[in-house]
């Protein structure tokens, strides 16, 4: 069955949709998998089609842009009401983007600048439009400040390949899976080792007792453990108790166990194993990005005390306990690794120490193409920016990274983080010279993230809010 999808544009430049369209013929395989209800880029710019739909009847809704007007606010609420999965599509929807910098000004100042002062229009007859205008909201709001967002895809715009990878992932995740799957039975029911040689009896983590039957490969018949590709059974085999006990008895995850359980979680729960987007329903990603969002519980079972994270991905209590216990082990293991790479990680330039000898504005001189921008004195935000674009600006455009992919895992606000990194790199430079060479600190340090930063807007507004 095609998956119903809606695309919505708020206040934005349309670039994220353009990046999607740049896939050209590569979009063809996806189109038959989706029932596109609204896609203003291509057809139907009216919201009526969406208004008529039942609540939550649209599986996936993409939102591009920020909330600038009251109409944007209504659109966002409508999307949340009608869609099951909401995707913040691009930098603006994810963390405010360039548009978020408007929070440094009053509305009147913005209107004045746009319609009266800007150099490109002062010679024209353009006047401030007054008719049929939506009312402005006081500030640029992040979509996530108003509604729950399920998935974030960063970038200004997100790279076409990142979007198509996401579409492919959604198709896989939302598909019905194998026709052979029988959720009433388990892999154990067809296993040659059931009565003699069961891998669980050898202390090996085999997930056959909690996996639906239907698989023809049958790894256990070749003495390999089942990793749960056929996903959750509704009727766990009685051997589940042994599996449960093996998990309870793990006190430390060695490298081998770490591989086994990550492989299991990815296959069993259809996790993405990608880092180009963040999907909150992906329990591994959530463990990395928002570990504090899990509650931890302890339960006395017939196999002993079980420490687990409180999750219910299957709705079958014993399976949810096993998954919760595995996530608990991961959360507390120093061996649990997830890509936290930055733009610097994929940079082709020669890096010695990233220490600048003098800071330069972008237009001063011409940077060489082989040496780290920071070492040449140009401020490059690769070190506080999430990887995913292929480090396209430093590698292909001889331009420093501006930070459009937002912060990597572990950095809440890339602006202050960059200031702190710069402070430790520029120990030999005169602080006054540094300050003088930075003409627009907010626009530089929080170029894409001001609306999602600690301050969110002007400091004076923050003071007003606090009083
Ligand atoms: S736990 Fe694994 S090895 Fe044991 S019977 Fe089930 S599928 Fe076979
Ligand atoms: S700071 Fe910029 S130029 Fe230097 S390694 Fe990182 S991405 Fe490359
Ligand atoms: S290098 Fe930086 S600014 Fe350029 S596309 Fe990548 S994340 Fe964005």
Image (cartoon, helix red, strand yellow):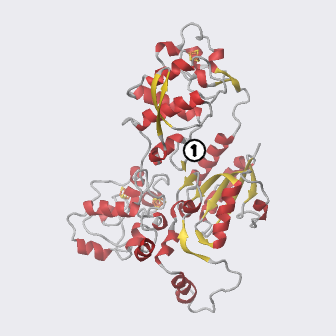
Q: Residue at x 58, y 86 (%)?
A: 115
Question: What residue occupies the far left of the structure in this picture?
Answer: 428
From the viewer's side, name the closer residue of 354 and 417. 417
Could you tell whether 384 is left or right of 97 in the image? Answer: left
Label 1 residue SS = loop
The location of residue 122, given as percent across then percent down, is 56, 91
Quadrant of the image containing the C terminus: bottom left
When the figure is inspected, residue 364 is found, relative to residue 88, above or below; the finding is below
From the viewer's side, name the closer residue of 185 and 101. 185
The location of residue 149, given as percent across then percent down, is 58, 55
Could you tell whether 409 is left or right of 70 in the image? Answer: left
Mark 1 Cβ inside 8 Å of ligand 3: no
From the viewer's side, name the closer residue of 279 and 42. 279
Question: What residue occupies the far top of the structure in this picture?
Answer: 196
Quadrant of the image containing the N terminus: top right
When the figure is inspected, residue 360 is found, relative to residue 229, above or below; the finding is below
The location of residue 415, given as percent across then percent down, is 39, 64
Q: Residues within 10 Å of mark 1 (few under 14, many from 20)?
A: some
Count numbered badges in the picture: 1
Q: Residue at x 25, y 60 (%)?
A: 424
Whether residue 258 appears in this view of the structure is: yes
Instruction: Please tell me in which quadrant of the rendered image residue 318 appears.
Output: top right
Q: Residue at x 60, y 17 (%)?
A: 238
When the figure is inspected, residue 256 is found, relative to residue 194, above or below; the finding is below
Residue occupied by mark 1: 281
């Amino acid at each position: 069955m095609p998956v119903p999808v809606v695309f919505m544009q708020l206040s934005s430049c349309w670039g994220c949709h353009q990046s999607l369209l740049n896939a050209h013929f590569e979009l063809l395989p996806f189109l038959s998998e989706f029932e596109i209800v609204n896609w203003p880029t291509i057809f139907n710019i009216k919201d009526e089609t969406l208004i008529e739909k039942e609540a939550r009847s649209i599986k996936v809704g993409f939102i591009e842009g920020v909330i600038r007007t009251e109409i944007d606010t209504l659109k966002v609420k409508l999307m949340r009401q009608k869609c099951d999965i909401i995707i913040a599509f691009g930098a603006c929807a994810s963390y405010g983007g360039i548009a978020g910098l408007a929070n440094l000004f009053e509305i009147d100042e913005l209107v004045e600048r746009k319609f009266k002062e800007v150099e490109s229009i002062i010679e024209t007859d353009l006047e401030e439009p007054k008719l049929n205008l939506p009312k402005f909201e006081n500030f640029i709001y992040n979509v996530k400040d108003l509604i729950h967002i399920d998935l974030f895809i960063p970038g200004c715009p997100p790279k076409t390949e990142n979007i198509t990878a996401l579409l492919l992932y959604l198709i896989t995740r939302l598909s019905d899976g194998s026709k052979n799957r029988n959720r009433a039975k388990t892999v154990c029911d067809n296993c040659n080792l059931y009565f003699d040689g069961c891998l669980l009896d050898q202390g090996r983590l085999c997930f056959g007792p909690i996996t639906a039957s239907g698989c023809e490969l049958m790894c256990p018949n070749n003495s390999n453990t089942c990793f749960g590709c056929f996903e959750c059974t509704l009727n766990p085999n009685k051997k589940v108790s042994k599996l449960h006990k093996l998990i309870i008895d793990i006190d430390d995850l060695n490298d081998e166990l770490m591989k086994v359980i990550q492989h299991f979680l990815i296959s069993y729960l259809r996790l993405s194993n990608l880092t180009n987007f963040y999907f909150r329903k992906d329990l591994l990603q959530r463990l990395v990005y928002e570990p504090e969002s899990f509650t931890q519980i302890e339960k006395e079972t017939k196999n002993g005390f079980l420490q687990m994270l409180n999750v219910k991905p299957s709705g079958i209590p014993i399976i949810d306990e096993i998954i919760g216990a595995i996530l608990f082990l991961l959360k507390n293991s120093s061996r649990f690794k997830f890509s936290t790479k930055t733009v610097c990680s994929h940079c082709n330039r020669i890096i010695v120490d990233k220490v600048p000898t003098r800071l330069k504005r972008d237009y001063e001189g011409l940077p060489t193409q082989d040496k780290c921008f920071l070492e040449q004195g140009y401020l490059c935000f690769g070190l506080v920016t999430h990887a995913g674009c292929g480090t396209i600006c430093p590698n292909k455009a001889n331009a420093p990274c501006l930070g459009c992919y937002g912060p990597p895992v572990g950095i809440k606000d890339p602006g202050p983080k960059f200031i702190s990194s710069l402070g430790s790199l520029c120990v030999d430079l005169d602080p006054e010279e540094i300050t003088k060479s930075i003409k627009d600190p907010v626009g530089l340090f929080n170029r894409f993230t001001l609306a999602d930063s600690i301050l969110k807007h002007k400091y004076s507004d923050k003071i007003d809010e606090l009083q």
